[in-house]
Amino acid sequence: MSTATPQKFEFQAEIAQLLDIVTHSLYTEKEIFVRELVSNASDALEKFRHTSLTEKEVFDADAKPAINLTTDDKAKTLTISDTGVGMTRAELIENLGTIAHSGSKAFLKALGEGGQKNANLIGQFGVGFYSAFMVAKSVKVYSRSWRTGEPGHVWTSDGSGSYEIEEAADLSRGSKIVLELKDECTEFATEGRIKEILERYSAFVSFPVNLNGTHINTVTALWLRSKHEIKDEEYTEFYKFQAHAYEDPMLRLHFSADAPLAINALLFVPQENTERYGFARLEPSVSLYCRKVLIDAAPKDLLPEWLRFLKGVVDSEDLPLNISRETMQDKALLDKLGKVITKRFLKFLDEEATQRPESYVKFYAQFGLFLKEGAALDHAHKDQLVKLLRFESSLTDKTKATSLADYVSRMGADQKEIYYLVGANRATIESGPYLEGFKARNLEVLFCYEPVDEYVMNNVREFDGKKLTAADHGDVKLSDLPKPEGALSEDDTKKLTNWLKETLGERVGEVKASDRLVDSPALAINADKFMSAHMRRMMKAMNKDGADTPSKVNLEINPRSAVMKRLFETHTASPEKARLVAEQILDNALISAGMLEDATPMVARLYKLLESV
Ligand code: ADP
Ligand code: MG
């Protein structure tokens, strides 16, 4: 088929769905489409600048880099054109008609999960182009690629399921997007309205922006200016433009350094951690500049992985413009740059934590997981990161958290280790049997509620020379407490533990008297050195190998508990009933430990026990 005649295409199903959402449910802040289209034009110009550095032959080599907007309030149109890379026919189909473009998929997923509230995540997910359909009843994209020998095309759609592509004569390089505005959106065909929108952020666009022939922006790199002369609103507008964000940033750090590298950096922490809600994994997005010239909008290995939530820019005049990660020298330079920035950001967080604890708590609630990830995996920054971690504990009030340093400051002279317990929430941990022995001895225990905590604690291993120890671990040794009146004698306890081991057989490893119990009759200790009960539960949930080998369990009993004293009497007097009680005690202990795998035998046994009451 000749490409000279118009050809009709259906949008991919997902795009059609996306367009439906964009045109019918996104009513707030319609004006953002201007920012999205200008930012696409700017991206295209940036791409062309890069391309022209390496390609010998480019079409329209002399076209000046610029973004031109024209309004026509009679025709009710707005036109945005650029002299960027442009698109070939195949690229028009690929970029504007298919989901291959990954942002769209993530966006749909996010909308599905987050509902209306997140409808304004549109730009963040790289589906900015489609925002044109919020205001336009028809969109035409005239485009001609930088590649020589490629004709120009016009892409047309009304956003309702299909689009058309047709060859177009006499186009120069770049793209021109013509919006035929909906009747209720004609304000965007007036110069005043567009000017007002552009003025807020066009200074951040590093190419000339013209409106109806008048140049309106002077390029100022905000990050190079002195922070004393920058207004909060300027920072916020910059953040929104640069990070495609719709809310103010949560935190901001603007700093410069001269040694060991000349750096100007402007970093932002967003309001929300979208990964927390199960959205797509964040991609690093702090842009790298050298003297205002963009080198890489999203350098992969500038900053450590756990800082992937950061937005903003880093500018260093010590970088070569043609920096390449392939050359060792440049890689070393990038590493060094990354280290300086990471260190500075960690210091900033530390200051937040001490000087503005409320702000830090808010930050930690969203982004604490990233700090944990770093503490566990990034050896270079582990020490500073561990200091920033916060946990509730047996001594804090509910929802108040403590740092490890504060924990250590409260430790008694003879306490050698830092204790923690992993559980779903405070109530679960407090009602379990593991805490009471520590409470009775005034030992503080950290409460860990996140599934990753156990992994983090295992990797961090120690703080300030003190080992991090799970309070439900088999090796924990606690000091003697004065024996209360009426406990079973050591002899009787020995007899009882031997009998229990014999009676419970394969179901338990060791049975012994416990030093961590005060009120509860017994507790189960996971005796598997390699897999904690918590980890086993997670592996089971994920259907991982190894989770269904029987767990190794030790039973610790409390010689002071009435249940044990009674059991000691019955185990000789009525051995059959005592056996049922012993089995039930073990099951109860397993339930508290979250290790009971099959509760069915327990039900029958309980009925038997009830019969004998
Ligand atoms: P994003 O900009 O995040 O990639 P968009 O939905 O805004 O997502 O744009 C989709 C794609 O369409 C871009 O990645 C780009 O390849 C292409 N595109 C959009 N506008 C232009 C333009 N003005 N010039 C060249 N390509 C463009
Ligand atoms: Mg875009």
Image: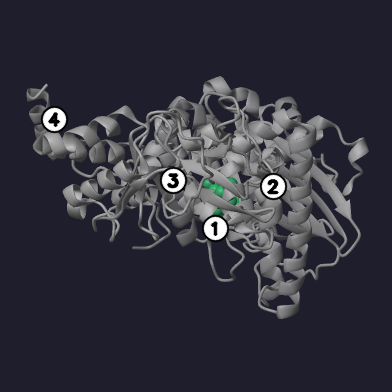
Side of 183 relative to 388 (left or right) = left
Q: Give the percent coordinates (x, y) of residue 377.
A: 58, 59
Which residue in the protein does label 1 denote?
Answer: 459
**Which amino acid type is shown beneath numbered disc 3?**
Asp
Mark 1 Cα shell of 10 Å, populated few (<14), some (14-19), many (≥20) = some
Q: Nearer the viewer, residue 371 or 589?
A: 589
Q: CA distance from mark 2 to mark 4?
A: 49 Å
Q: Are marks 3 and 1 in contact (CB under 8 Å)?
A: no
Side of 349 relative to 549 (left or right) = right
Q: Give the percent coordinates (x, y) of residue 251.
A: 72, 37
Q: Earlier in the sequence, mark 3 or mark 2?
A: 2
**Quadrant position of the N terminus in the picture:** bottom left
Mark 4 Cα shell of 10 Å, populated few (<14), some (14-19), many (≥20) = some
Which residue in the protein does label 4 denote?
Answer: 606
Residue 527 occupies quadrant: bottom left
* Nearer the camera: disc 4 or disc 1: 4
Residue at disc 3, secondary structure: loop
Q: Are marks 2 and 4 in contact (CB under 8 Å)?
A: no
Q: Nearer the viewer, residue 210 or 48?
A: 48
Residue 200 occupies quadrant: top right
**Which amino acid type is shown beneath numbered disc 2?**
Lys
Q: Earlier in the sequence, mark 4 or mark 1?
A: 1
**Which amino acid type is shown beneath numbered disc 4?**
Leu
Q: CA distance from mark 3 to mark 4?
A: 27 Å
Which residue in the protein does label 2 denote?
Answer: 387
Q: CA distance from mark 3 to mark 2?
A: 24 Å
Mark 3 Cα shell of 10 Å, populated few (<14), some (14-19), many (≥20) = many
